[in-house]
Image (spheres, helix red, strand yellow):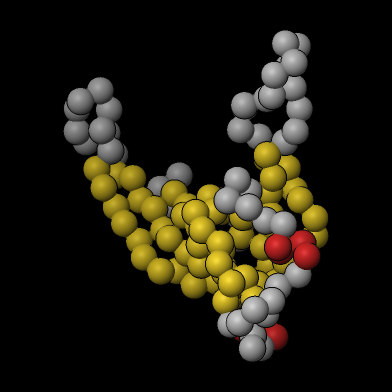
């Protein structure tokens, strides 16, 4: 069971904006919009990695830093509808969802594993 005190972060689900262009094809601009109300979650950073960036075959283009984080939320119909195509906004950082699994038993919690660039 998840205690209320463990859910100490507010996360916002972001979904790719629906829309089209003049040719009737979908908008691939990558813009995301707020989906539903904020959700209480527990946040746990799993690992951080850094690597040298590459630009045109030259090294020293910068260091790319990423963090892998899991967000644990209570199971709900809104949380159930989240997919790996969505994003999570937490404390001003946008995370890309890389995996979703049940946690703490059937229909008790969902765990979103996500990555974010921390060097921006």
Q: Foreground: 114 or 55?
A: 114
On screen, residue 84 versus residue 107, left or right, reads: left
- Measuring from the top left, give residue 6's x and y in whole percent: 62, 83
- Measuring from the top left, give residue 118's x and y in whole percent: 43, 52
Residue at the image point whose x is 61% and y is 33% from the top:
30
Residue at the image point whose x is 35% and y is 51% from the top:
65
Q: Foreground: 99 or 45?
A: 99
Above or below, 109 relative to 67:
below
| Corner quadrant of residue 55 | top left
On screen, residue 25 versus residue 95, left or right, reads: right
Quadrant location of the C terminus in the rendered image: top left
- Measuring from the top left, give residue 104's x and y in whole percent: 58, 82
| Corner quadrant of residue 78 | bottom right
On screen, residue 68 versus residue 105, left or right, reads: left
- Measuring from the top left, give residue 80's x and y in whole percent: 70, 63
Above or below, 52 relative to 89:
above
Examine the rendering and report whether any part of residue 95 can be seen: no
Quadrant location of the N terminus in the rendered image: bottom right
Examine the rendering and report whether any part of residue 55 can be seen: yes
């Amino acid at each position: 069971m998840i205690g209320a005190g463990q859910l100490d972060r507010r996360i916002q689900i972001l979904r790719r904006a629906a829309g089209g262009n003049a040719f009737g094809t979908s908008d691939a601009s990558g813009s995301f919009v707020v989906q539903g109300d904020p959700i209480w979650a527990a946040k746990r950073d799993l690992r951080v990695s850094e690597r040298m960036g590459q630009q045109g075959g030259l090294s020293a283009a910068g260091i790319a830093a990423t963090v892998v984080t899991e967000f644990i939320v209570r199971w709900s119909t809104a949380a159930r509808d989240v997919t790996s195509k969505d994003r999570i906004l937490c404390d001003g950082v946008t995370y890309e969802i890389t995996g979703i699994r049940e946690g703490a038993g059937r229909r008790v919690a969902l765990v979103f594993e996500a990555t974010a660039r921390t060097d921006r």
